Amino acid sequence: MGPMLAAQRPSAPSTQLEEIYLQPGPRNRLVLSLCSDIPSQVNWAFARLAAYSQQLGDRFLLADYPGLDEVLMSYVQRLCAALRGEPRSEWDASNDQDEHVDGRVVDQGIGAPGENGGMGLGMACVHLAVPKRRQVALPLPAHFSPSSVPRDAQTLRHALAAVLVLRNVTLTMQNAARLTAFPGVLQIVAEALQHSMTTQSLVDWNTCADFRVNLLEILESLASRIQLSEWVQSAYTGAGEPEERAVRTEDRVFALLHTLLHTTKDRALLLGSLRCMRAIVSNPANEHVLSETTWSHTPLRLHIIPRCLALLPLTQDPELLESGLDLLYQMIVTGENAILIGALTVAQVSAAVDASSLWQDDADTRPLVDSVVGYLVRNLSLGKTVWERDSVITANTSAPWSAEVPSAARQRRLRERALREKRERLTVEERNQWKTLRPEEKEQLQQMHEPERGIAWMKMLFEQDSLGEVTQMEFWITYRDQFTPMAAHGAAPLQPAANLIRNVSQTFPGAAAMVISPGIGQQPRFIIRGISLRDRSQASFACSWEDCPAPQAPCAEAIKDHLDVHASAAKDGQCRWHNCNANTQDSPDANSLLRQHVRTHMPQPVDDVQLAVPGPPAQGTMDHPGTITFEVERTPSVPSAAPQEGPLPCGVAFLSALVLRFVTRAARNVLKRSGAGCPTHTYGGAQSSSKAPLEGGDMFGCPIPPTMQDANGGLDGVQKAPAVSAAQIAAARDLMNALASREDAMVKVALQNDILCRIISDTLVLIRTPSAEHTM
């Protein structure tokens, strides 16, 4: 940005006064100021346009301001005309800027807010300054001299400002499309860039270096529509310089970018040339002229791929590395360029940066493929984020042997199902037995008050069951029948039915009273869902004492008396319980000690069992398989537009993975067509094909449909690929060997990086599955 813009550009055009300048139409104040050629008005317009185009780029559309693109281009054209050495009358618009009215000098002012009541002098009227003494004007030099002539410096500043505004507006897609349709825009930008790169120039471009960078960014938005001619292929074939200069503007732009790409030492210019070249290469119409090799695998002088490979070590500059990888990927998908990576030497890559190194006698001819693959695999981990993830192990319950593995959860489900089936088969007598309180339970409840008594009663007779239900009438009648006799003998009175049913949800969380409407003509059902009758049936105690005449006992108190009788009758102190050999004969109080011993054979009531505090769940069992902790990596990514899709990879790691996958596919296809195979790496599990592969039979991993194949094994409407040369076979073999040597590193990244896993897995499959008839 020139010094004029740095001093006058406002911080933010946010006031209402600034907004009125953005009103679209042919009478826009900014456009008219630029067309006036009055220096103060032009300076004012450029200062605001620079701010508007940067801060309001999504609202500032060239289509809304007719003539703005033309007048901006005119300032760049004036500078180009001045640099070409044309007469001053062709480019100096300030010759007649001073006009006199009645001896006064007309001065439009700059229209700054705050002047003349805040409206701006340029918007209100023409201010007539006091008469100035006429001075003898010095003759202007014929050539462009911005360092010595203020008016020439002003022309340069206006061109710098115009390029800055054009750069800002082209960041919007609509503006870029409109600028592309401007007549001769490519020639204007190319000529301005050519003059700025000239060493013998009238301008010190180091003082306004952003001019070239802005031109490259404008060119980037235009480059995708550039179509190259056959001149590019003829000019970069062989070792000598092209004999003729390019005639078409598109070819001259390519030659300029090619020179800049291989010679510049400026990072910003190198970054801009990489992006512009990538946009040109991405045009499918240019594929036929951008081949780096011939069918005999002779490297050409294009040297774009070697230049990109020379940038691979720049891990400290991710932006420059990403631009180089982006251009590299666009180049290897063009023609047979991908195989060139397997044949490049150290000297050829050095020549892409310094052309003189290729012709030295001691040029390094060592292959570079191992280093290139190593750098690409290393890039897969650049910018990654690592964290630990706990994943719960899932038991394989569908396996045929899983039913034989003990499982507490399965046993609990089986018991619950059996109990539910048992409740469904209950008779009225059995159901009444389950709802009958034992004497000790009645004694305990008789001393309690409501609502505590009702809650304790619920816990005795009912249990929580998400699938169970009890009618509200049965629930209330059971309560009433139990406690009405107690209330008649002085116990606490009964609580209302509504209060009793309301307390069910507090006693059993999840249970609730509800009304079920079955349908028209049927009575609604009032139920309590979430509880069931507790199984209170207990097996009668069977005494295992030898020769016991009456082994059955009806209750716990009867069991105790029953065993006391056996202990009193045993005068020898010998316990005759089945498989018990206890003997208390030698004790002083043998009979009392034997009575205490035989009570250990009594069954313990279920309600009296004291459950221990549960510990942590067991690890590695069928019920609790446990968790596994592993590291997860993720390289830079952006959110996907589709909600069901995961994040999309981006950046250096993503582009490196794409390059690896494509060069692997290209090398495998070359070996497949030639029948040479990959001799060093024969993997177990590779299945031989029953017939020879068709020509071009593998396109991006998918077989070609039979309808596309002609009788000769080719493709309908597609010419067969020429036979591969020995140099291509050797390069493809070296490339596959280098990829196979980095297989372990790629496997590790694929296992830990979820967003790069698919691309790297595709690469690993291509390395691992060469056809058996192609191995040696």
Image (cartoon, grey):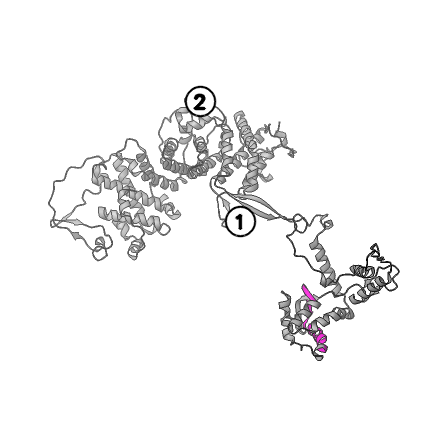
Using residue 133 as the reference point, say whether residue 208 is left or right of it: right
In the rendered structure, which amino acid carries the disc numbered 1?
A: Glu
> Which of the pair 51/445 is nearer the observer?
445
Question: Which residue is at a point 72% across and 65% down the rendered structure image?
Answer: 534
Q: What range of the chain is rendered magenta?
A: 462-485
Using residue 92 as the reference point, say whether residue 635 is left or right of it: right
Numbered circle sitting on residue 645:
1
Q: Disc 2 marks which residue?
A: 363
State the CA–CA distance, disc 1 to disc 2.
50 Å
Q: Quadrant of residue 552?
A: bottom right
Secondary structure found at label 1:
loop
Q: Quadrant of residue 88?
A: top left
Q: Quadrant of the C terminus?
A: top right
Using residue 288 as the reference point, say whether residue 540 is left or right of it: right
Question: Which residue is at a point 56% across and 47% down the rendered structure image?
Answer: 389
Residue 473 in the image: x percent, y percent?
A: 69, 74
> Which of the pair 288/100 is nearer the observer?
100
